Amino acid sequence: MSVEDNMLTLASKYNLEEGKTQDYYNLHGKWCLTKNGGEKIRIAEGITYTSPVITLGAVSVAYQATFTDKAGNIIHMNGSCRFDGTKNTPEKSHAPEMAWKRMETRGTIKILGLLAQGIYGDDEFDTDFKQGTQPAPQQAVAQTVSPSGQAYVEGEAMNIPPEGTEGWFTNAEKLPQDWANQMGRLCELTRQERSKWEGKLIDNSGLFQKDDGTTWFPSAKYGGFNQIVFDVNTYNGQTKSKAKFAFKIYKIVRETLDTLEQNGSVEISVPNGNGGVQLEQILRHDQQPQLEPQPVAGQGVAPPVQPSPTFTPDDIPF
């Protein structure tokens, strides 16, 4: 199906009205879901999300939350916005609200799966693009998580190397968003926190044997995938980008998750702490052992843990 077919299918299923001030519209060839359209879909599908976690960077802000629908599907999604522009636009003056709305619509689109493939939230596009003065939308600032589990936004570090830099290639700047999509897929497959496996997957995909017999892992130098994408080094007068190395890691991780999805488990190589390698197994959520409630002294069986409350934000007036 084409993106237009997907959009029209959603419109029919959820009674969406076409129009820039309604539920969906076509913006310079891109099919967009508005805030109103997203709300209609969330109500129809019983989509809720946990209280978002905010990450504030020097020039950007991001929110991350876990979305659940009435069928029990779970995905993790973030939304972000830069506020370092020179024009007085909503992105600059209302960056937190813009990031929040991007998170909401991205989560809604992601949980719909293939049915919404190729559709954007209209808040993904910056003011210049909407006004037709810019040929392409602003790339969303990608959020990553370091191996230690500390979330941070790396938008300020995303400096595209000069044209012709060895190792850099066309559209390499889109790798962080592609990576974020794979990390969302990881969370869906395992129903575990992204930080539990992200750094280990990077290490498994980027390791190599050194001459002394020890193994080098990316975590020895890099705090996350985005740092690898935009890393540029000059040695002996030659400047090289690590973007192709990042792309190699991305492809191996994608294949690893394919195996996890198909087989229910996959083994990866991780540091053993002594310069060597050990194997760890990632299990798909339906293959993970179920823990039984543990008795509490003097109280019989412990009650089940209550799920985190969902969060309903105040309405954002644009």
Image: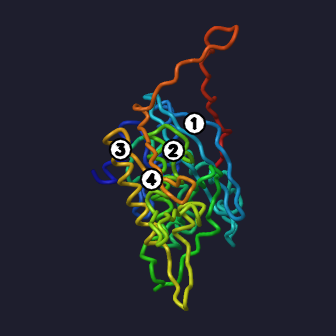
User: Where residue 166 appears, x then y in whole percent?
Assistant: 45, 83
Q: Answer yes or no: is residue 273 visible.
A: yes
Q: CA distance from mark 2 to mark 3?
A: 14 Å
User: Where residue 52 appears, x then y in whole percent?
Assistant: 64, 42
Residue at numbered disc 3: 115
User: Where residue 242 appears, x then y in whole percent?
Assistant: 49, 73
Q: Is residue 299 above or below residue 23?
A: above
CB of mark 1 within 8 Å of CB of mark 2? yes
Q: Would you identify the image quadrant in which residue 233 lies? A: bottom right
Q: CA distance from mark 3 to mark 4?
A: 35 Å
Residue at image position (47%, 66%) is 213
CB of mark 2 within 8 Å of CB of mark 4? no
Q: Residues within 10 Å of mark 1 (few under 14, many from 20)?
A: many
Kind of residue at disc 2: Gly
Q: In this rendering, which labeled residue sits more in front, label 3 or label 4? A: 4
Residue at numbered disc 4: 269
Q: CA distance from mark 1 to mark 2?
A: 9 Å
Q: Would you identify the image quadrant in which residue 265 lies? A: top left
Q: CA distance from mark 2 to mark 4?
A: 31 Å
Residue at numbered disc 2: 107
Residue at numbered disc 1: 49
Q: CA distance from mark 4 to mark 1?
A: 33 Å
Kind of residue at disc 4: Ser
Kind of residue at disc 1: Tyr
Q: Nearer the viewer, residue 312 or 219?
A: 219
User: Where residue 299 appears, x then y in whole percent?
Assistant: 68, 8
